[in-house]
Image (tube, rainbow, N blue to C red):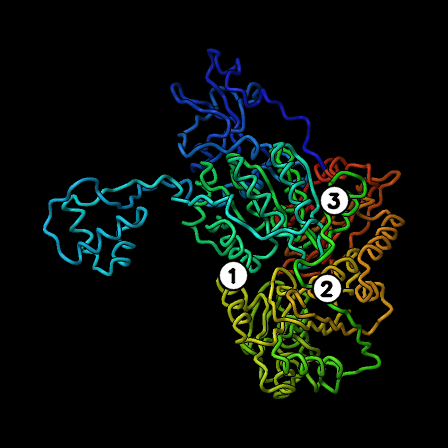
């Protein structure tokens, strides 16, 4: 994957000869709307504009904020019909690298450039007028005022601390706001205007970190050399769980800060950031900027502005942080690069890992991909010499990898209406008796995945989706995990009207917690899912409960499978290891191995040895055998061989079309027309249309088509003319997913 070579530096040249001509200057403006491209506007005489400027322009009856994308040296719009730019927003410019990134991403994902730009302009408050903000500090020289004990405390505070707000000063000095206000009126305090974007303390790159092992130091030295070169390169930091990958790339962050450049770290889950942020603050003395959905609007505005001004040096965020306007980006890190959550499935569909590599190439900075279970795509790029390979083969310090045991559920069956086998139940009791902690992993939220009527067999289904409603007994509700629909648990069956006839089928984490509490009444159980761990604050509180032993049995979904370090957690039990192998996904085995390997890695991360017990109904399944034998590389080699034989990614290319709409007949008609006009030729296969596994989602009927081509064929060149030739009704949406990761 490489950025297009079609970019012309002349497009952004300020001394374009057309600009100096006698005619009114014309510019191309891209707006954050799903439009086909840029619109031409005139520049009023005396208005100074440059590519990247944020401008307000008329669009129909309203005025819209957009970005000047370049000069319109050729235009089909007559001068008499050309509308003028209304005004320029003096808030800085969208950097050239961001504009190239928008163009590249739009072309690759076959998305409207304006829809991609919208992700870079996702904080409306940035573009609104702001009042200047001031902080207070001590006044130089002698102060001639009547002194009181309260006033003296205020003066002591402002002399001891950096500039603070009046509210913070009052709280720190233990006085009322009127005392501070009185000192301001008496001209005893100086006001310091805060720069746009707020104050962001500088991280300390030279503060002492952990002592690195030889393997860690070699890896850190390699990445630091790449940082000093200020050149694009991709390195895979491949270390077993607990090997200290974070400490290695912290050294690279420190070197980037010494180069006075900015760093972006992408994490796959917001909840992962709690312990990570604490480790960062311990290493660098300050917290980094954060960018994810749990950050409020005003904080995001300050973050965006400080990044654009180059004052915020380190940002940790979700995939959307890729679109931030970095003034001088020097390093990108993608932690847990294999994670499927880096794939955005709504709006503009893209994979943040792949786009991070593109962003690094456009910006000309190194990219680090970190994982204990690298993705197949990354593994192949390493084997073909495109990425450097940095290996950390052992756990840091005294910790060793846990022993993995498979429990054959065909032999060691749990009791009736139970899901914990006797060997695992004994191990849980033994671990708790030693004062250690347990993690039981089941990747199913709620109490039970299916609820049906015992009398007539009726199943409770979502009214908006072809999906069963999941019972959440702790909150006494039914929920659709696809559209979010919720309803109270009914007391009678809507089909046969029988009272209290519903029965839960199968286990979820809540039902598992009930079983543990029955087996071990003294256990301090905590259920951890995306329902309970919905942000860094909740995640931090969860970490505190575990480290203080307020919790000694964690029952969780994939949200606890990675990123957490609990020294006293020595047993991991996987309840239904076969769950991830269903569904027909071409990456099912790879994902299942990655997930189970990651959750196994939570055990024995300190000086106490850990063990992992995996319950499975098929001990001969290659995934299970690889986990038991610790043979990651052998498993990946076999998986790669199967993919290559089938010419599946990364040895072939896929693109999915998702056709959806409220009218099933209209959706079927569009799908049929697409099938009739589908491209054909050597190495080109078009599958479908067929109803999607979720044939109805959020009230929209869905059909899927799949384009499969050889590695050297451009799917974009096939898709673009195919789709452009169609007349799609406004009620039907055709969504393109290049390199699909899910097939629901």
Closer to the camera in the image, 140 or 323 = 140
Q: How far apart are marks 2 and 3 (CA)?
A: 21 Å
* Element at label 3: strand
Q: Mark 2 points at which residue?
A: 401
Residue 712 x/y as whole percent: 82, 36
Q: How many labels does the image show?
A: 3
SS of the residue at dot 1? loop
> Which tag is nearer the camera, tag 2 or tag 3?
2
Residue ID at (71%, 85%): 417
Mark 1 surroundings: few (<14), some (14-19) or many (≥20) residues within 10 A = some
Secondary structure at badge 2 equals: loop
The location of residue 164, given as percent across then percent down, is: 30, 49
Q: Mark 1 points at which residue?
A: 535
Front in this rendered view, residue 350 or 316: 316
Q: Residue 389 carries which label?
A: 3
Of mark 2 and mark 1, the one earlier in the sequence is 2
- Asked if 44 appears above or below 143 in the picture, the reply is above
Task: Identify which residue is drawn at 58% across, 53% down.
Answer: 210
Q: In this view, does 482 lie above or below 430?
A: above
Q: Which mark is residue 475?
A: none
Instruction: State if disc 1 and disc 3 touch (CB < 8 Å).
Output: no
């Amino acid at each position: 994957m490489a950025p297009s070579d079609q970019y012309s530096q002349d497009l952004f040249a300020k001394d374009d000869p057309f600009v100096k001509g006698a005619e009114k200057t014309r510019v191309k403006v891209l707006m954050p709307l799903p439009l086909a491209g840029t619109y031409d506007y005139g520049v009023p005489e005396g208005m100074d504009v440059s590519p990247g400027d944020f401008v307000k322009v008329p669009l129909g009856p309203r005025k819209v904020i957009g970005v000047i994308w370049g000069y319109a040296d050729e235009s089909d719009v007559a001068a008499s019909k050309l509308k003028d730019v209304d005004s320029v927003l003096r808030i800085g410019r969208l950097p050239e690298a961001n504009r190239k990134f928008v163009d590249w991403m739009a072309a690759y994902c076959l998305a409207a450039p304006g829809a991609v730009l919208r992700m870079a302009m996702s904080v409306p408050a940035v573009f609104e007028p702001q009042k200047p903000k001031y902080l207070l500090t001590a006044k130089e020289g002698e102060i001639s005022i009547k002194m009181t004990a309260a006033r003296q405390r205020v003066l002591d505070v402002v002399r001891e601390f950096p500039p603070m707000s009046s509210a913070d000063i009052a709280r720190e000095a233990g006085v009322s706001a009127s005392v501070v206000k009185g000192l301001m009126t008496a001209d005893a305090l100086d006001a310091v205007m805060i720069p746009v974007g707020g104050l962001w303390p500088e991280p300390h790159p030279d503060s002492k970190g952990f002592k690195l092992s030889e393997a860690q130091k070699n890896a850190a030295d390699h990445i630091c050399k790449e940082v000093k070169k200020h050149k694009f390169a991709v390195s895979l930091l491949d270390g077993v769980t607990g090997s200290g990958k974070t400490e290695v790339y912290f050294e690279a962050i420190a070197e980037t800060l010494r180069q006075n450049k900015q760093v972006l770290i992408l994490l796959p889950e917001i909840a992962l950031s709690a312990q990570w942020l604490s480790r960062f603050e311990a290493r660098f003395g300050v917290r980094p900027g954060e960018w994810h959905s749990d950050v409020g609007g005003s904080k995001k505005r300050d973050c965006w502005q400080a990044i654009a001004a180059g004052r915020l040096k380190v940002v940790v965020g979700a995939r959307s942080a890729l679109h931030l306007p970095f003034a001088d980006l020097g390093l990108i890190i993608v932690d847990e690069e294999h994670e499927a959550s880096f794939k955005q499935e709504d709006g503009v569909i893209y994979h943040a890992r792949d786009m991070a590599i593109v962003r690094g190439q456009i910006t000309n900075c190194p990219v680090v991909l970190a994982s204990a279970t690298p993705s197949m795509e990354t593994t192949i790029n390493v084997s073909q010499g495109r990425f450097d390979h940095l290996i950390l083969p052992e756990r840091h310090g005294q910790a060793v990898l846990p022993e993995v045991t498979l429990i054959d559920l065909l032999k060691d069956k749990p009791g009736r209406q139970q899901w914990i086998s006797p060997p695992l139940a004994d191990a849980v009791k033994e671990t708790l008796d030693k004062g250690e902690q347990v993690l039981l992993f089941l990747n199913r939220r709620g109490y039970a995945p299916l609820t049906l009527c015992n009398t007539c067999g009726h199943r409770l289904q979502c009214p908006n989706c072809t999906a069963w409603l999941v019972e959440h007994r702790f909150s006494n509700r039914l929920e659709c995990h696809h559209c979010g629909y919720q309803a109270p648990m009914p007391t009678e069956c809507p089909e046969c009207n029988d009272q209290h006839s519903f029965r839960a089928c199968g286990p979820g984490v809540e039902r598992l917690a009930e079983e543990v509490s029955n087996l071990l009444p003294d256990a301090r159980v905590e259920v951890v899912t995306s329902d309970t761990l919905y942000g860094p604050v909740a995640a931090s509180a969860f970490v505190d409960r575990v480290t203080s032993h307020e919790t000694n049995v964690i029952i969780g979904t994939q949200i606890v499978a990675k990123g957490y370090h609990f020294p006293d957690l020595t047993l991991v039990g996987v309840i239904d290891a076969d769950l991830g192998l269903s569904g027909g996904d071409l990456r099912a085995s790879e994902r299942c191995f990655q997930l189970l390997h990651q959750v196994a890695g939570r055990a024995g991360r300190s000086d106490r040895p850990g063990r992992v017990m995996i319950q499975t109904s098929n001990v001969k399944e290659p995934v299970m055998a690889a986990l038991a034998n610790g043979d990651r590389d052998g498993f990946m080699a076999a998986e790669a061989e199967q993919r290559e034989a089938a010419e599946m990614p990364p040895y072939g290319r896929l693109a999915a079309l998702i056709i959806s709409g409220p009218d099933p007949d209209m959706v079927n008609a569009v799908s049929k027309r697409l099938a009739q006009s589908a491209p054909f030729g050597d190495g080109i296969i078009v599958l479908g249309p067929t109803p999607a596994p979720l044939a109805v989602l959020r009230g929209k009927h869905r059909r899927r088509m799949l384009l499969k081509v050889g590695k050297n064929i451009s799917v974009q060149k096939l898709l673009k003319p195919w789709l452009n030739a169609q007349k799609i009704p406004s009620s039907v949406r055709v969504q393109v997913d290049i390199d699909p990761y899910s097939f629901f």
